[in-house]
Amino acid sequence: MAFKRTRKRRDFLRNATLGTIGLTFASGTAFRNYKTGSEVKKVGIIGLDTSHSTAFTRMLNSSEPDPRFSGYRIVAAYPRGSNDIKSSTDRIPGYTEEVKKYGVQIVNSIEELLSLVDYILLETNDGRLHLEQAVPVMRAGKRFFIDKPIAASLPDVIAIFRLSEIYNVPLFSSSSLRYIPGVDDIARGAIGKVTGAFAYSPATLEKTHPDLFWYGVHGVEILFTVMGTGCVSVSRTFTEGADVATGVWNDGRIGTFRGIRTGRADYGGTVFGEKGIMVLGKYGGYEPLLVEIARFFETGVPPVKPEETTEIFAFMTAADESKKAGGKPVMIEEVMKKAKKDAEKSVLKYTKQ
């Protein structure tokens, strides 16, 4: 019994020390899980106002986690997310209690969270808060993933990636729909060069965000996953029940997104190639995305380039401008030019502090 008490005290002191040492993001800090004998790499969550937070916690903190998760575990969370989106704020108490069941410590500030972990999942549902919440993470040198939408404006998207360069901290953002079945086959050349695509997803509107940022981003992410970058213009047709946003790429290819607000809603798409046509498979959940996040935490190499994520949000911004213009095509270059000027103000603000 004396040996057990001594070891428990030693383990407690060791873990407490690891929780307070400020190691750089490149160190890959880990402590040993004495129940399983495996190393645990400490991850923190910002925002418990989305089901993604609880889903990631269940998978990473499982008693038998997928080995592809490489020993990463959620050890602490800062619950505050949106301040005024009711569908988000109402979730926080319940999701907080749920993650606590998996041994997650609840903290009172992002600063406290950063002192306890080495990697961050920025899960706050409200994209308006992401830039503000991302800055202390970057200053602390922690690799991090930002869930969709990466921000609630194109200038904020650009500012986040610019600050990532300045602070030399890698990050990436993605919808889990990027990993829908079929995209890997297309990437391997199953239908030859992609000549066009049609993607769809629910497109619920949230008044605090540009129309497609809130939920349409899922389908737009599918579209760019198979088409790649190079979109030059976007035109949009809008009704209360649906959206159709059509992009023209710089090589003449056409990609279309359909946002669904009435009738049955689902995720998917059809991809056209030189050698064939492929219908994408059924959405399979968060696991493939979480595998990529774990790999990114290990390597520091983002699986999605900043340029592609930025263009996804430029596409959706141009779609909003097209809606305002009665469906006329809007050039991506135009929205990017304006957004870059606005982003400079945020970059200056956060580098002067």
Image: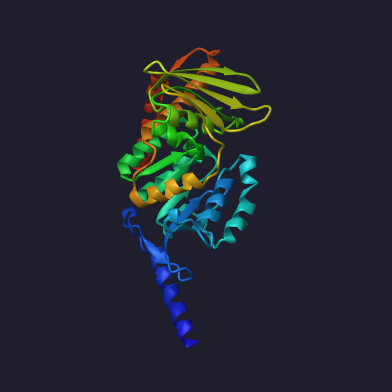
Total tally of numbered discs in the picture:
0
Q: Quadrant of the C terminus?
A: top left
Residue lying at the far front of the rendered structure: 275
Q: Residue at x 34, y 53 (%)?
A: 25
Q: Is residue 54 left or right of residue 228?
A: right
The answer to whether one can see residue 338 in this image is: yes
Q: In the picture shown, does residue 342 fall above or below 347?
A: above
Q: Residue at x 50, y 29 (%)?
A: 220
Q: Position of residue 337 (x, y in %)?
A: 37, 22
Q: Position of residue 303 (x, y in %)?
A: 38, 41
Give the colouring mode of the picture. Answer: rainbow
Q: Is residue 131 left or right of residue 83?
A: left
Q: Residue at x 50, y 58 (%)?
A: 65
The answer to whether one can see residue 216 in this image is: no
Q: In the picture shown, does residue 174 fall above or below 71?
A: above
Residue lying at the far bottom of the rendered structure: 2
Residue lying at the far right of the rendered structure: 263
Q: In the picture shown, does residue 341 fall above or below 29?
A: above
- Depth check, front residue: 31 or 115: 31
Q: Position of residue 250 (x, y in %)?
A: 37, 18
Q: In the picture shown, does residue 73 fall above or below 228?
A: below
Q: Position of residue 242 (x, y in %)?
A: 62, 23
Q: Residue at x 40, y 44 (%)?
A: 135
User: Dividing the picture into quarters, in which one does residue 244 lie?
Assistant: top right
- Depth check, front residue: 187 or 144: 187
